[in-house]
Amino acid sequence: MSSLITSEEISYEADIVWLEDVDNLDYVRQSLDRLPTRGTKPVYHRDGRMVGYALLSSYAKPSRSSGTFRRRVFWLLPHDRDSAPHGLYAKGAPAEAVDPRTLAAGIKGYKTQRSEGGPPSTAMQELGITLPL
């Protein structure tokens, strides 16, 4: 779950590679996966599709026990809002979801009104105010 990802766990991120244009996505799911490399495109083993992944700096050290690196992977499932706009997540978002506009290397991101499926109030729209959740 994204809420369980700490800043320390992603402190060695150098960049995020997006495989799709995230400007059209209200949210992406994120997880920390154990991967064999710091920077190549990871193999994807979930339903749905991978939309991005983190690259680690050369300072990132592998796990002593497994030799793997913990890297963030960003993904969507077939029943997520981008594919099923009137489905399960028409309002609300999965626990591990964040607004991709709030993500950067080393920054875990957060939910926003947009990622939760609700527009800001009329007053907020008129003032041009958007707030993170």
Image (cartoon, rainbow, N blue to C red):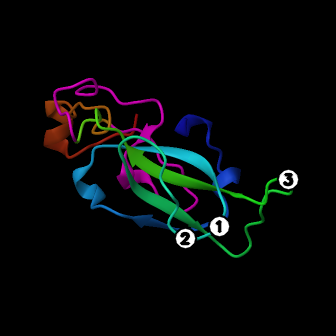
Left or right of 124 on screen, residue 29? right
Residue located 29% across and 42% down the image? 130
Mark with earlier residue (3, 1): 1
Q: Categorize mark 3 by other alpha carbons within 10 Å: few (<14), some (14-19), many (20+).
A: few
Q: Position of residue 7 (x, y in %)?
A: 65, 50
44 or 59: which is nearer to us?
Answer: 44
Residue type, numbered disc 1: Thr
**Secondary structure state at the residue bearing disc 1:** loop
Figure quadrant of residue 66: bottom right
Position of residue 65 measured from the top left corner of the image (x, y, whole percent): 85, 53
Magenta segment main secondary structure: loop
Per the rendering, the mark at residue 37 is 1
Outermost residue on the right side: it is 64
Give the mark nearer the N terminus: 3 vs 2: 2
Q: Estimate the spatial distance between the alpha carbons at disc 3 and disc 2, rounded to whole Å.
A: 21 Å
Residue position marked by numbered label 2 in the rendering: 40
User: Residue 102 location, x and y as percent?
Assistant: 41, 52
Mark 3 belongs to which amino acid?
Ser
Instruction: Let me know if residue 23 is in the magenta part.
Output: no
Q: CA–CA distance between discs 3 and 1?
A: 15 Å
Q: Amino acid at mark 2?
A: Thr
In this rendering, the answer to whether 54 lies above or below 25 is: below
Q: Which residues are magenta?
A: 83-112
Callout 2 crowding tier (Cα within 10 Å): few <14, some 14–19, many ≥20: few
**Residue drawn at the location 25% of the way across and 32% of the way down:** 117
In the picture of the structure, the residue carrying the numbered disc 3 is: 65
Marks 3 and 2: CB-CB under 8 Å? no
Q: Are marks 2 and 1 in contact (CB under 8 Å)?
A: yes
